[in-house]
Image (cartoon, helix red, strand yellow):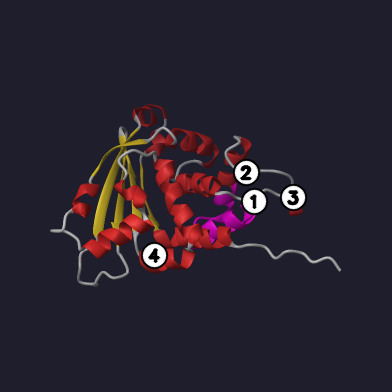
Amino acid sequence: MALASELVELLSEVTGIPRATMTRYARFAREAGLLSQSGRGKSAAHMRPDDAVNLLICLLVNGVAQDASTYITTARQMDVYSSDPDKLLDDRYFESDTRSQLRQTLPILFDREHTFPELLRALVEAAIDDWQGFEERLGESNIVFDCDIYEALVDFTIYPDDTLVSDPPISITFSYNHPLIGRRYPGFQRTTQLRFSVIARIGQLMAHKPKESSNA
């Protein structure tokens, strides 16, 4: 479990984005009802996977903080319309144990019907379930978010833990259609990169269970 302030601090630390910028993303997302909130201090809301996803969307879009709610709500409309996971099923490309590992760790990569936030949520939940294993297996992997007027191309470069250094990484590309973004929000035209190690750190933070208080 983690508070919003802790998640903001972590994302700033691991991405190099100023804490003030991350705080503004969180503030505008919260004001739009897109970040959990309930009181202060001990009664403050604990962050859920969807909260982490919403802040990751802000990071990937890398736009103006006050438009955070626009980025998040528009991303919810980004349905995948093309992908190339079929080649992962072909023995000519990858050994069966590698395919099996990917299916177990990231089954959504084989799913042709999902939204962009659903994909990010699956990653965050996998990291929460086993952040150490997630980082060991996929920490060197990354997401490249390349967004233009008509579509967002999300490219995964995956380095399974049993892949030799000399072997080429596994590359999977999803293309998301969002025809409204470019015409209304030119700030979406960005290219950013996010390492899976960042998601592993989020999982570590959110998986933490606070100690139960004992009554004397």
Cα distance between the residues tagged 3 and 1: 9 Å
Residue picked out by circle 2: 36
Cα distance between the residues tagged 4 and 1: 25 Å
Residue 149 vertical position relative to residue 198 in the rendered view, above or below: above
Q: Earlier in the sequence, mark 2 or mark 4?
A: 2
Residue depicted at 63% across the width and 62% down the height:
209
> Observer-nearest residue: 123 or 65?
123
Residue contact at pointers 4 and 1, CB within 8 angstroms:
no
Residue 26 vertical position relative to residue 94 in the rendered view, above or below: above
Q: Earlier in the sequence, mark 3 or mark 2?
A: 2
Residue picked out by circle 1: 46
Q: Which corner quadrant of the image does residue 167 belong to? A: bottom left
Residue depicted at 44% across the width and 46% down the height:
62
Q: Earlier in the sequence, mark 4 or mark 1?
A: 1
Q: Amino acid at mark 2?
A: Ser
- Residue 152 lies, in percent from the top left, at 32, 40
> Observer-nearest residue: 103 or 183?
103
- Residue 201 lies, in percent from the top left, at 50, 62
Predominant SS along the magenta part: helix
